[in-house]
Each structure stands twice: as structure tokens, then as C-alpha cells.
Image (tube, rainbow, N blue to C red):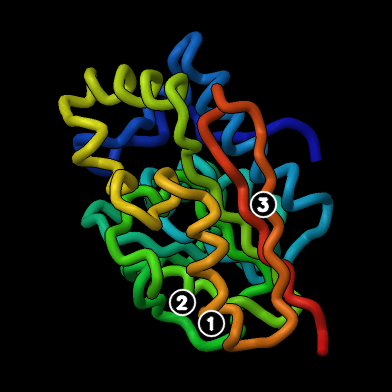
Amino acid sequence: MGGLRVPRREHIHETHETDPLKFYYQFGMRTIFRKRLEMVVQLMGDKRYDQLLEVGFGSGIFLKELSRRCRNLHGIDVHENFHLVEAMLAKEGVQANLVHSAAQKIEFEDERFDCVVSASVLEHIHELDPAIAEIARVLKRDGVAILAFPVENLLTDVALWITYIPLRTRLKDEHVSGSPGHPRGDSAALRHRSRPASSVVPSTRFLLVLRLPVCEDIALTSRRRHR
């Protein structure tokens, strides 16, 4: 399907004051930030999904690429600037159903999606258990969930700390991952927390895939096999 496609810079806008959108276009930084999305795309493979959900679409930076990989694209988020994302999608010729919904209470029916994607969102969520349970609930039995979040090491921590300086916020205020069980604090804890969710439908397998620390993300895929 070719390389990663993102919206034209003049079409897309930040949806809140700490939105790191500019780094996806800034010389030097864009390689690192886009690499995270490319990692997710690699895990998706060449399959074209029927129903795809992005949990936490933010400015919509990933929606254009995701639209190429599914027949029906959906996204949820909790910010109040959906109109900016909808205007961008119209200019880019992308169709997506955007719903105001939190990850902890996804406003879709059970087993709706054959693919759920969430990139750099989990580290911002305080209530991780219900978010994982909800992702499992809306995922089909043979579906795939790809969740990406920052790894915890010195290199990543320094990079994130520097990144948040121009955004006028602090890493510890944005990433609630310092407490035990949050994704950056302990990646194994996410697998542990996934088990209660996976009991909703038996035979769920979780695979943890680690990529380059400088790319800041771990990708977690959940594949549900037919009974």
C-alpha cells in the first residue's frame, strides 16, 4: 500500500494545547513520530479490514492512513474539537464515523470491529482496566487489536521530557504511567490486566512486540481465534 500517508499540514490542526501534532511535520522530529505509526501499520499487515476503530484519534493524524486499510473507519475521543478533525477529513477526502466516547466506555456494541488501533493513548488513561475490557468487548472473536505506548527507559524518558517542554506541560502530568500497572511503568502489567478482558471470549492470545526504544512505542496485538 506504499508509505505512510498523513494529511497535508495546512489541512490539520491541534485539538488541544498539548497536542504534539507539529512534531509529525517538523524536520528531525517527524521521523521519530511517524515511525510509531509505521510500526502499527506493519503489525496490521496487508489485510483490508471491514470495521476498524481508532481509540483516541486526537487531531486525526492517523485517520487518512487507516482509511486505506478498511472499508468502514470509526474513531472515538473525548476532546471538544471534532469539527477541526471533520473539516480535515473533508479536505482529504476521507470518510470516518467519529464518536465522542471515552476508552473506558466505548459507545459501540459487542464484537463490532475486526481491528482496533490505539497509538500513544493508553499512557494518558488513569482507569486502564475498563479501557482494556472495553477494547476486548468491541473486538470480534477473530479480530486484531494493536495498542502502542511508550516504553520506559532513560532514552525515552529524556526524549519525552524534551518533547513536552515546548508544549508547556510536564511529562508526569500527561503520562499517568508512573503508578504500578500502567503501560510505561510495567509492560507485563498490561498483559496481566488484559486477562480479565480476554475471559469475555476464550482463546484470546496476546503478543508483545518491542521495537526500537527511540521510537518510544511497544505494540501489543490481540488476536482472537475462532472457537
| Residue named by callout 3 | 208
Q: Which badge, 1 or 3, is on the more N-terminal residue? A: 1
Q: Secondary structure at mark 1?
A: helix
Q: Earlier in the sequence, mark 2 or mark 3?
A: 2
How many numbered marks does the figure carry?
3
Mark nearer the viewer, 2 or 3: 3
Which residue appears at 48% of the width and 68% of the height?
A: 193
Find the residue positioned furthest to the left: 168
Residue 67, percent from left and from top: 63, 53
- Contact, CB < 8 Å: mark 1 with mark 2? yes
The answer to whether residue 92 is seen in the rendering is yes
Cα gap from disc 1 to disc 3, whole angstroms: 20 Å
The x and y percentages for residue 82 are 31, 56
Q: Which residue is mark 1?
A: 137
User: Up-down: is 211 above or below 112?
Assistant: above
Question: What crowding class fits label 2: few (fewer than 14 Cα within 10 Å), some (14-19), or many (20 or more)?
Answer: many
Q: Quadrant of the N terminus?
A: top right
Residue type, label 1: Arg
Image vertical order of residue 159 relative to residue 66, above or below: above
- The residue tagged 2 is 134
What numbered label is drawn on residue 196? none
Q: For marks 1 and 2, give the CA distance.
A: 5 Å
Between 209 and 62, the one lying in front of the other is 209
Name the kind of residue labelled 2 in the image.
Glu
